[in-house]
Amino acid sequence: MHISQVALQIQARCTFFDIRTDKKRPALIYHTSKKNLYSHDYRDQHTLLLGFGDGQVQVFDSRTRKNLIVFQDPYLKAVGDIRFNRLSKHFAFFGIPEFTLWQYNDNEMRLWTHHYLSARPNAMFDGVYKTNGEFLPSAAPAIAVTDSCGMFAVYSLS
């Protein structure tokens, strides 16, 4: 199955669309039985990571329609975004209140590092400290990260 579009919904249903077919009909619907599915990214054509509002991450195989791994990110209260770097094989989880970097090898997730950009803010105008970021398209692996305090930083992964 060639999956190119994914729709995530708050009621924790993941809908896969195959753009080679009728876009009104999903190729696969996966109901996680868990609320607050906020984010996703692919490791490969069939392996999808799903991030939830309570910090849980599920590694889902679309062929078997089963979770390979389910774990709790020890540093995030909510996983708002997930990014994968195919060169370094790192996953980055962004959200509340910091970001974490993970290595995924042989169906095992290993925490590599975690960071706040700013000193822990005592009070924000909206009450939430959130991070976001993206891997940079360069030969040397690096990640650019922003936070809700207005900070921007680039971290080298080598």
Image (cartoon, helix red, strand yellow):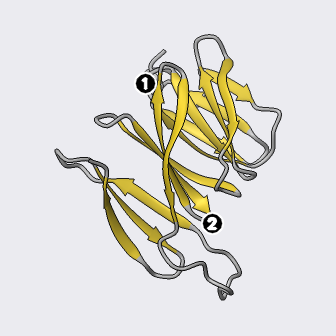
Residue appearing at x 59%, y 60% in the figure:
95
- Residue 73: x and y in percent read 65, 46
Residue 22 visible somewhere in the drawing:
no
21 or 138: nearer the eye? 138
Residue 37 visible somewhere in the drawing:
yes
Q: Which element is circle 1 on?
A: loop
Q: Quadrant of residue 59?
A: top right
Residue 121 falls left or right of residue 104? right
Distance (Cα) linking label 1 and label 2: 28 Å
The residue at the far left in this view is 139
Residue appearing at x 46%, y 81% in the figure:
150
Residue appearing at x 62%, y 25% in the figure:
60
Q: Which element is circle 2 on?
A: loop
Task: Name the residue tied to disc 2.
Answer: 97
Q: Amino acid at mark 2?
A: Pro
Say above or below: 125 vs 136. Answer: below
Q: Amino acid at mark 1?
A: Asp
Say above or below: 156 vs 130. Answer: above
Image depth: mark 1 or mark 2 in front: 2
Q: Residues within 10 Å of mark 1 (few under 14, many from 20)?
A: few
- Residue 99: x and y in percent read 53, 58
Task: Name the residue tied to disc 1.
Answer: 44
121 or 18: nearer the eye? 121
- What count of labels does the image hold? 2
Residue 99 falls left or right of residue 35? left
